[in-house]
Amino acid sequence: MTDELTICDACEGDAAAIADIYAHYVLESAASFETEPPDAQVMADRIAKVLGSGYPWLVVRDSGDRVLGFAYAQRFGPRAGYLYSCETHIFVRNDALGRGIGTMLINALLAACEARGYRQAFALIAGTEPASVVLHARAGYLPCGTLTGAGWKHGQWTDVFMMQRKLGAGNETLPESHA
């Protein structure tokens, strides 16, 4: 395709398009363990919460301003010790797969997380999503564990692969304060 793709910060106005993209994964796959797709208002609230917590939420747009994918990071765990770790999520419109959008998103998301001072990124990937495992591995994530039968969806138990990537200096130096 000759479409020019751009990455930018998500905004509340993107919520309907994001909800539409995400609905496919909720209904048709185990990429999300949600079973009911959130509507645009719920998604707008999620975007506001992520951005308000200092984490990035990005979208990829085509030349017609259509959202083709989104990626965001959130706190990995609720305890204070996880302050410098984040969990990453990436979703691409089903009809836009294979165009490099996932790679664009993951690279931009990791750069945004590093710029905010995060030191470790984690991804929890359903065992039914091998393309996501490959995407993360190409971005430098390494396997760090398997949660066997961790999720139940579509009438079957699904494993979850944990992958981890160092951000910046990782755990080689003391953390710096970040926003």
Image (spheres, rainbow, N blue to C red):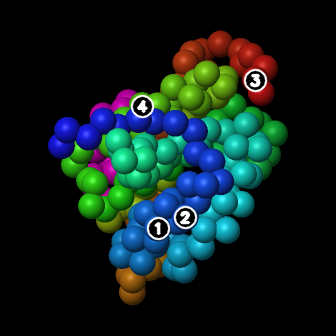
Question: Of the residues tagged 4 and 2, which is closer to the observer?
Answer: 2
Q: Earlier in the sequence, mark 1 or mark 3?
A: 1
Q: Amino acid at mark 3?
A: His
Prevailing secondary structure of the magenta residues: helix
Quarter location, residue 100:
top left
30 over 132 or under it: above or below: below
Residue that mark 4 sits on: 107
Determine if the magenta segment contains residue 146: no
Q: Distance from label 2 to label 3 (Cα)?
A: 31 Å
Is the residue under label 4 in contact with that under label 1 (CB below 8 Å)? no
What segment is highlighted magenta in the picture? 129-140
- Mark 1, secondary structure of its residue: helix
| Residue ID at (61%, 22%) | 115
Q: Distance from label 1 to label 3 (Cα)?
A: 33 Å
Question: Of the residues tagged 1 and 3, which is closer to the observer?
Answer: 1
Q: Amino acid at mark 2?
A: Ala
Disc 2 crowd, CA 10 A, few/some/many (<14, 14-19, 20+): some
Residue that mark 2 sits on: 16
Is the residue under label 1 in contact with that under label 2 (CB below 8 Å)? yes
Residue 75 seen: no
Quarter location, residue 114:
top right
Residue that mark 3 sits on: 178
